[in-house]
């Protein structure tokens, strides 16, 4: 019996040592080489947008600040000067207005990093139009990322897009809360409604490729 007890305690000590070793073992850093990985990722997205697979519809839209202020000059644009859009809109959806920067929009969205980690969303679980309430904000208000504004200025009510925003039009070269520097942002966006309180109601879409 004594030998059995000694054997039991020896095994228990050994198991505890193994557990401690496991807890101290470092896990792979999901953000290792983050800047380089994000640069390569947006380059690959740009290539897909330029050569879309059969059956897919892609667009690219230049940073609205460049379009407004910098076009017409000898400006060399890079892949980081565009947002890229995979159009997921159903063919039978009736499309409505495109917002101005001063308009208010109602949107449903979910955003994630290139490693799949969700960092922001207006709903949880699977989206359901009968259940989930949209978020509301002014398209061009301070604090809205440039990539968001660029995409929305080309989007129509009823459209459903997957939008790829390079860090240059996202949160830039510094960490922002839980968002690492140099992060490409991917958003699933549904534009539900454009609220245009005054002014002309005509809308036009400008596409610069």
Image: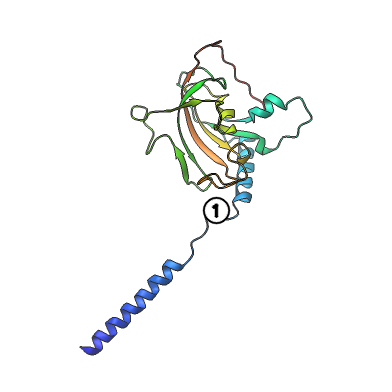
Picture residue at 39% right of the left edge, 33% below the top: 127
Question: Can you give x and y, in whole percent of width and height, for residue 200 in the image?
Answer: 56, 10
Give the image quarter of residue 63.
top right
Q: How is the image coloured?
A: rainbow
Of helix, strand and loop, which one carries label 1?
A: loop
Left or right: 109 with respect to 14?
right
Q: Quadrant of the C terminus?
A: top right
Q: Is residue 55 visible?
A: no
Question: Can you give x and y, in whole percent of width and height, for residue 50 in the image?
Answer: 64, 34
Picture residue at 42% right of the left edge, 66% below the top: 23
Q: Is residue 138 above or below residue 125?
A: above
Q: Is residue 127 above or below residue 104?
A: below
Query: Which residue in the rendered view is the most extreme toward the left?
Result: 1
Picture residue at 51% right of the left edge, 17% below the top: 97
Question: Can you give x and y, in whole percent of width and height, for residue 151 in the image?
Answer: 57, 29
Residue receiving disc 1: 31
Query: Which residue in the rendered view is the most extreme toward the top?
Result: 200
């Amino acid at each position: 019996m004594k030998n059995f007890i000694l054997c039991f305690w020896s095994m228990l000590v050994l198991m505890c040592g193994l557990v401690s070793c496991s807890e101290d073992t470092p896990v792979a850093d999901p953000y290792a080489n983050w800047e380089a990985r994000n640069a390569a990722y947006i380059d690959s997205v740009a290539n897909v947008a330029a050569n879309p697979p059969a059956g897919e519809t892609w667009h690219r839209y230049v940073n609205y600040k460049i379009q407004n202020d910098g076009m017409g000059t000898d400006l060399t644009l890079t892949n980081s000067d565009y947002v890229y859009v995979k159009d997921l809109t159903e063919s039978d959806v009736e499309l409505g207005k495109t917002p101005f920067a001063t308009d208010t929009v109602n949107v449903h969205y979910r955003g994630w990093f290139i490693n799949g980690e969700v960092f922001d969303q207006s709903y949880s679980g699977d989206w359901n139009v009968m259940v989930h309430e949209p978020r509301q904000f002014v398209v061009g208000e301070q604090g809205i990322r440039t990539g968001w504004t660029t995409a929305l200025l080309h989007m129509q009510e009823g459209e459903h897009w997957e939008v790829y925003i390079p860090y240059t039009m996202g949160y830039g070269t510094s960490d922002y809360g839980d968002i690492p520097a140099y992060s490409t942002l991917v958003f699933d966006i549904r534009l539900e409604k454009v609220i245009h309180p005054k002014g002309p109601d005509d809308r036009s879409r400008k596409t610069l490729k």
